[in-house]
Structure formats: structure tokens, C-alpha cells
Amino acid sequence: MSLRRTTLHGAHVELGAKMVPFGGWDMPVSYPIGTIEEHMTCRRAAVMFDVSHLGTVRVEGAGSFESLQRVLTNDLAKVAPGRAQYTHLLDPADASVIDDIIVWWVDHEVFDVMPNASNTDRVVKYLGGHDTTSTRSVIAVQGPASREKVARVSPEAAAVGRFRVERIEVCGCPCVVAGTGYTGEDGIEIAVPNHHTRSMWDALLSAGVVPAGLGARDTLRLESGLPLHGHELGEGITPLQANLNWVVGWKKTEFQGRAALAAEKERGVARVLRGIATEGRRPSREGSAVRTAHGSGVVTSGNFSPVLGHGIAMAFLPPACTEGDEVEIDVRGSALVGRVVALPFVRKPASGA
């Protein structure tokens, strides 16, 4: 099967990006400056990611709020039109996380549900709506200087607050802008019609925003302790195991998978997601076994932290493990010493109203 290409594919190739298959798409993993420099530029200034491979499912019309509220874990009644909310779609049988989702509540009866790249069809199956992924692109501008630089292109887009959603005309084109992202930094994401995507990308380049690839996006989200579907979330993994109880609207009488999740809450989880800091630059990797004083665990994501200068990992460990506990990670037959630490590894305050 041939890989899908985003509208910005040509721009990435022109900029010298290294392209790799990801979720059925041909995506930039890094640009010539390299993943570490892209990562640090996001922490210090501003970068932009082409995240058009992520899905958009438009759910709208009478009853749209009720249908989402009945299926998804979080409580939409806690927010309102013009807001975004992180939530989960659970398997009805065992409360596994089918997908973790951002819902953009665009206006009264219009919701843009944003699933992971490979899960769009499953989200449509459970939520209804229609897949609009092929009609728009999404550019994520992230970093402490992101709003300052976006303001050179569109002051209105730069003013969209954290977890706010607005319809805005950007560079003469109607867009949906949200104060969301996946880096732990402040920033915005712009959903733009495909025909206008290249001109907006070029305008942001001219404003001094540096392009970054999936490699930096992954190290940034790992430093920030953000879960990735297929690693910290997915089949056999519940929100409670992933330390995401706050994503569950327990006051709701109904959401898909509620009974199975409530049963797990009652009996207690068998494992829990923790952070591990390791010695030196050598990182652990997904699937590495972890030995602890309380039993075994497994690494879900591991890499070198450019900010901290040593290896970091997230892992499912026995619930008895606590911060400060020493652990050993088996990396290709050799022991890598680590210590259980609080998540996120790097904590940065988000700005924006």
C-alpha cells in the first residue's frame, strides 16, 4: 500500500527533511539541523510541526453533545463552546483505551474530534460523524516564543488562549485555531483548508518559526510525560493504569467502558505508569524489562533527554513502587540503573489566557 502524503509533503522535501513511514503516511522525522536542535528550539523559542496526519472527525447537529457525552470518558459539561478537552474512548469490554482524543468544541453543535492517525476509522465507528481529515491540514506551532512569532502572521490566532478554540480568518482564509499541543510548551494548532496550507507554512517560516519533525515531537512529549497511543495507551491499558484518572468523568452515569473501569478501580490496578531517570546518556527502549524490589515491569517509551542530559523512560511498574526507588532496566542483556521519578520529567508553565 502506498503511503499517504500531507499537503506539505513537497515543502518538507524542499527543506531537506528525512521522510519516514508513520501511521500510513510519509512524514518528516527530522530536518538538517537534527532532532536535538529542533527539540531545544521548541524549548527555547518556537517550532512548527505538520500534524496533518492526525485525524479530524466532525460531529455536528442536534444531539451531538449528548452522543459524545454518552461515549467518551471525560465530562464535556465541564467545558463549553470555544473550548478543547482531552478525553478517552474506551473498549466497552475491558476499558482499554481505544484512543486518546482532543475534542475541539468549535461552536454550539459543532465538534472536531481529533483522534490519532491510525484510529480515525474506529472513532467514526463509535462516535459517528464524518472524516474530514483529507480536507484540511494542521500546523502545530509550539514553544515559549510561539505566540510572538504567530502574531507576525495573525495577531488573532496568536491570541487564542490555552485550550480555547476559535474560528479565525488567518491570512485571508477561514481556519479553526486551538490553544493545544503535544510538547508541554505553550502554543497553538491551526486547522487550515488544504488550498491555503503552503502559503501559511511559508508565512510562518518567514516569521522565524523553525520546522521540526516527528523525532523532536516524540522527545518533547516524553520529557513532558505525555502518553502516546500504542505505548502508554492502547490494548490492555486503561486510564487508571496510565495514571489518568482525571480524564474520567466519574460523576457521569454513563460512558463507554464505565462498568469495566469501575470494577478495576474497586479492585485496584495491577500496574501503574511511572517515570524513570537513568544514569548517563544511554537510553532504555520500549519493551525493556524493568527489575524492581516489588516485582517486574516494562518500559513503554525511552530516550535521551536533551534538556536533562541523561536517559529518561516511562514504564509500567508494580503499584508499590514509589519515587526514589532504584530499578534496573535490561537493555540488550546489560543492566541500566535508574530511579523512579515524578512525571513530567521537565515541567514548564504554560502561558496564554
Image (cartoon, rainbow, N blue to C red):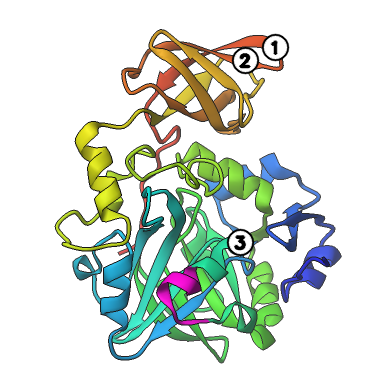
184 is within the stretch colored magenta? no
User: Which residue is pictured at 55% across the width and 52% down the height?
Assistant: 45
Question: How far apart are the alpha carbons under marks 1 and 3?
Answer: 33 Å
Residue 333 shows which numbered tag? Answer: 1
In the rendered image, the vertical position of residue 319 relative to residue 226, given as above or below: above
Query: In terms of secondary structure, where does tag 2 sit?
Result: strand
Task: Locate residue 16: give its quadrant.
Answer: bottom right
Measured as percent of width and height from the top left, residue 51 is found at: 61, 64
274 or 46: which is nearer to us?
A: 274
Q: In terms of sequence position, does the residue under pointer 2 or pointer 3 come before the other?
A: 3
Depth check: 229 or 94 in front? 94
Which SS does the magenta portion mostly show? helix
Callout 2, which amino acid?
Asp
Badge 3: how crowded within 10 Å, few (<14), some, or many (20+)?
Answer: some
According to the image, label 3 marks what residue? Answer: 118
Q: Is residue 3 above or below residue 317?
A: below
Question: Is the residue marked by circle 2 packed among few (<14), some (14-19), or many (20+) residues within 10 Å?
Answer: some
The image quadrant that residue 321 belongs to is top left
Residue shown at the point (81%, 50%) measured from the top left: 32
Displayed quadrant of residue 109: bottom left
Identify the image quadrant of the N terminus.
bottom right
Whole-Å distance between the Cαs marked 2 and 3? 30 Å
Q: Please state the extent of the stretch shown in magenta in the rendering.
A: 123-130
Percent x, y for residue 68? 32, 73
In the visual, does 250 lie left or right of 164? left
Residue behind mark 2: 330
Q: Is residue 289 above or below residue 258?
A: above
Which kind of residue does numbered mark 3 sit on? Ser
